Image (spheres, rainbow, N blue to C red):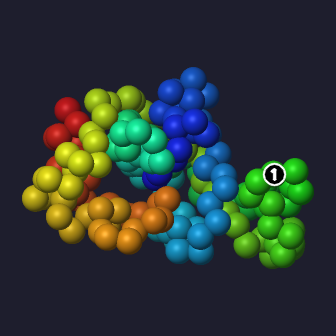
Amino acid sequence: MKSEPDEASIDHLQAAGTLAWTGVRNYQARNFMRDAMQVGDGVLFYHSSCPEPGIAGLAEVRSAAYPDATQFDPTSPYFDPKSVRETPRWLHVDVGFVRKTRLLSLAEMKRDPALSTMRTLQPGNRLSITPVTPGEWAHLLKVLG
């Protein structure tokens, strides 16, 4: 799961304990939350759109997907005037802090042959949420220590 650190960093998550992963406005990323994420699943907390993007920590899914209230709030940057409460378009999950890690930079990840097919590293991928295979997860846990 990617987040801009000035909006929600691993430090914010550590301080809060749990954060609602609001603001996802891509149908494919929403569907990953809705259809694939289960309570207890591990999360690679990735800092993006910053001087050195990369994995900054580990988290876990703490809730099933439920409607993202920001879609109904006209003062929110994530407001969606076409979304209605009876049939909300946008969902989110709650994410809980597990631990900070060393920063595993995007450059380092791209150099690792074991991650050559990792979805988030593929050219053109802009999704904030992508699945990780069990093999990628195990490898990254070893790399992160």
Please indicate, yes or no, whether residue 15 appears anywhere in the rendered image: yes
Residue 118 lies left or right of residue 7; in this view the side is left
Q: In the rendering, at what x and y percent does residue 99 appear?
A: 39, 30
Q: Mark 1 Cα within 10 Å, few/some/many (few <14, many 20+)?
A: few
| Front in this rendered view, residue 117 or 140 | 117
Q: Is residue 96 left or right of residue 110?
A: right
Q: Position of residue 7 (x, y in %)?
A: 61, 40
Residue 82 in the image, given as x and y percentages of width and height: 84, 75
**Residue 19, relative to residue 76: is it above or below?**
above
Q: Nearer the viewer, residue 131 or 46?
A: 46
**Residue shown at the point (23%, 37%) measured from the top left:** 144
Quadrant for residue 69, please give it: bottom right
| Residue identifier under label 1 | 76
Extreme-top residue of the structure = 15
Q: Is residue 134 left or right of residue 2?
A: left
Considering the image in quadrants, where does the C terminus appear? Answer: top left
Q: Nearer the viewer, residue 108 or 36?
A: 108
Using the rendered view, name the quadrant where residue 143 is placed: top left
> Hey, what amino acid is under mark 1?
Ser
Q: Residue at x 18, y 59 (%)?
A: 115
Given the current orientation, which residue lies at the most extreme right position?
74
- Residue occupying the point 12% across, 58% down: 114
The quarter of the displayed image where residue 58 is located: top left
At numbered mark 1, what does the secondary structure look like: helix, strand or loop?
Answer: loop
Q: Position of residue 126 (x, y in %)?
A: 45, 65
